[in-house]
Every structure is written in C-alpha cells, then in structure tokens.
C-alpha cells in the first residue's frame, strides 16, 4: 500500500457514512427499490426547476432514463409522449417490461417509449422534441460536447432543456461513495490513487456483490476514472456558447444545501450557525471560482434559438 493509499484509508476511517448515500446505496441493492427511489428523486426535483417544468402536451426526451421511473413521472405530469434514451440495454429491457405491466391500469405508461442509444447520436429526427429533461446523466456522457449538440438538434425552436448534474470538482464528483466516504477526494488524490484505494477496499469488502450487475463499477485495470467525464461548469458554458442554445436560468446548490437548513430548523433559536454556514456556502457557490468546488448540483435550463446545431 502506498503512502497516498494509506492516507485515503485513514481519512475514510474518520468519516461516517452520509445519510443520503446510505439511502441511495440501499435503494441500489434491489431493482424495485431503485425504481421507486428514482421516481421519488425526480418527483422531489420537479418543483425546483425555474422556470417551472410544465410538460403538459409536450414531446419529451429523457436523456439517461435509467430504470424508466422518471420517464413515467414525466408522462404522469401530462407529457403527450416521452422517449427514454438510455445507453444500457439492460435498463431499456427492464424499463419496457415494467411499463408494459403498468400500461393496462395507467394510461400514462402507454405514452412512454424507450430507446437504447448513445446521447451523442440520438436516434431522433431534427426538431422533434419540445422538452429535454436529463437528471444526473451529463456528468457521465462521453464525449459531452456532441451530446449537447444533439440536445440542440432534436429540440424545436423555443423548446427547452432541463439539465441537472454535479460539476466534477464538487464534493462527490468522482461518484465513488460506495468505497470512499469523505468529500472532495479528487482534490487531494490522483485518479490512480483513488482507483487503487477503491480496488483494495472492493477486494476486502466485495461491495459490488450487493448490487445488480448493471449498477456495479469495476475499476480493475483502469488508470483513470472511466465512469465520469469530469465536466466543469466552465467547460459546459464554453460548449453551450457555440450552440444555438441560450441559458434561461442556472441554479447552483452548494454542499449541505439540504442538511444545513434542516439542522437550523431542528435547533430553532440555536440554529444561527448552520443558517450562517448555509448562507456563506450559497454565496461562495455563486462566485466564478467557488461554483466549481462548492456547488454540488447545477440546475440549468436552456432554450433552443434559431440557428444551425451543426
């Protein structure tokens, strides 16, 4: 074990599991629970979008549809048609089977179709979509620039894209919470060190065995993190600037944005410290430098403007 790996192990031992990660990892251990978690996650996010996410009568593309839960949610929110685009064939197969079983009792399920495909070359005609929604997918799509160009291509003029993703340098940017509990490990250690640490922990605890095959992450033989594209907000902005897309709104949620307000409310008159910390983190997340590290979630709404997406 190298000194860097030992440092990862030592820091890890000092940090408890974060409650949100416990909930997620528990849900991932069972396909039905994972579907329910994804649905609840999408439902909780719906009111957060500004301007509001109004899907009534819309042709919707769900990029990175996963289990299909959010696609079903969008249909239930009134979408005329939802296409779930997912690169994993297993996810597509199980999504089709699950919604087919629901279709007899739920008319919304019949308005959803799933397609196995790559977001960098979406199998859809030009200007065929009114609204694109993508939650926790654009940090994984590689390469990301063609995928954003595809968003512009499939959207009709005036159509909007609602994208939610974590900037790479945010607290949980590497998506290694199963093995490395402490935040910002990638600010302290190289990819090689993190991969070696994950492989060592996995060999000892065999955590992957708790999850279905399609949710496992095998880093053996890797020299860089293969499952994240390391997208930053600055890179995202540069890509968008070259496309016929304008930013309608951007909301940056800082680390602790759920925990600190809840803690302040629980403490009542004694909650001044967590309220002050939450206010400071929101201010830092709004700065050019701080947003890449402090913002743990970016909610960006884009609108298709006239012009070529090529």
Image: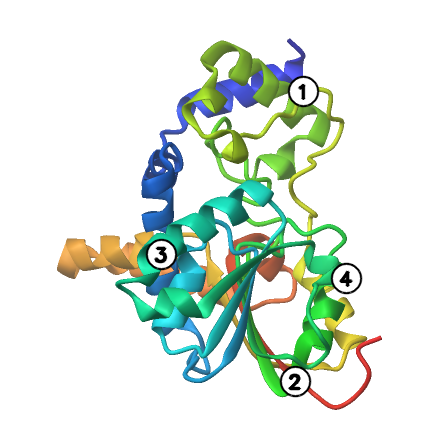
| Dot in front, 2 or 1 | 2
Rendered position, 242 above or below 213: below
Compute the Cα span from label 4 to label 1: 28 Å
Residue marked by disc 2:
156
In this orientation, which residue lies closer to the viewer: 79 or 14? 79
> For numbered disc 3, what is the local secondary structure?
helix
Residue 45 visible in rendering: no
For the point 44% across and 84% down, the residue is 57
The crowding category of the residue bearing disc 3, from other C-alpha atoms within 10 Å (few below 14, some 14 to 19, many at least 20), is: some
Screen quadrant of the C terminus: bottom right
Relative to residue 263, is residue 238 depicted above or below? below
Q: Earlier in the sequence, mark 1 or mark 3?
A: 3
- For marks 2 and 3, the one nearer the N-term is 3
Q: Nearer the viewer, mark 1 or mark 3?
A: 3
First in residue order: circle 2 vs circle 4: 4
Q: Position of residue 68 (x, y in %)?
A: 45, 55
């Amino acid at each position: 074990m190298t000194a860097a790996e030992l440092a990862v192990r030592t820091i890890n031992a000092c940090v408890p599991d974060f409650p949100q990660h416990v909930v997620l990892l528990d849900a991932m251990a069972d396909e039905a629970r994972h579907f329910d978690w994804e649905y609840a996650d999408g439902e909780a996010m719906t009111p957060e979008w500004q301007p509001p996410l109004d899907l009534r009568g819309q042709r919707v593309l769900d990029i990175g549809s996963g289990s299909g839960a959010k696609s079903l949610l969008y249909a239930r929110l009134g979408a005329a048609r939802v296409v779930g685009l997912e690169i994993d064939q297993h996810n597509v197969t199980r999504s089709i089977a699950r919604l087919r079983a629901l279709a007899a009792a739920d008319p919304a399920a019949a308005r959803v179709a799933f397609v196995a495909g790559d977001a960098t070359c979406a199998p859809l005609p030009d200007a065929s979509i009114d609204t694109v929604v993508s939650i926790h997918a654009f940090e994984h799509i590689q390469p990301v620039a063609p995928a954003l160009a595809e968003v512009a291509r499939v959207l009709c003029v005036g159509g909007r894209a609602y994208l939610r993703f974590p900037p790479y340098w945010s607290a949980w940017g590497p998506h290694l919470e199963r093995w490395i509990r402490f935040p910002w490990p990638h600010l302290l250690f190289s990819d090689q060190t993190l991969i070696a640490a994950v492989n060592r922990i996995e060999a000892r605890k065999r955590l992957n065995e708790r999850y279905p095959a399609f949710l496992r992450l095998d880093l053996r033989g890797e020299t860089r993190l293969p499952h994240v594209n390391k997208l930053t907000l600055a890179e995202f902005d540069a890509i968008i600037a070259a496309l016929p897309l304008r930013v309608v709104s951007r909301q940056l949620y800082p680390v602790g944005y759920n925990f600190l307000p809840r803690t302040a409310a629980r403490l009542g008159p004694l909650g001044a410290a967590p309220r002050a910390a939450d206010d400071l983190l929101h201010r830092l997340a709004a700065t050019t430098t701080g947003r890449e590290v402090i913002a743990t979630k970016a909610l960006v709404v884009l609108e298709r403007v006239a012009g070529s997406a090529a």
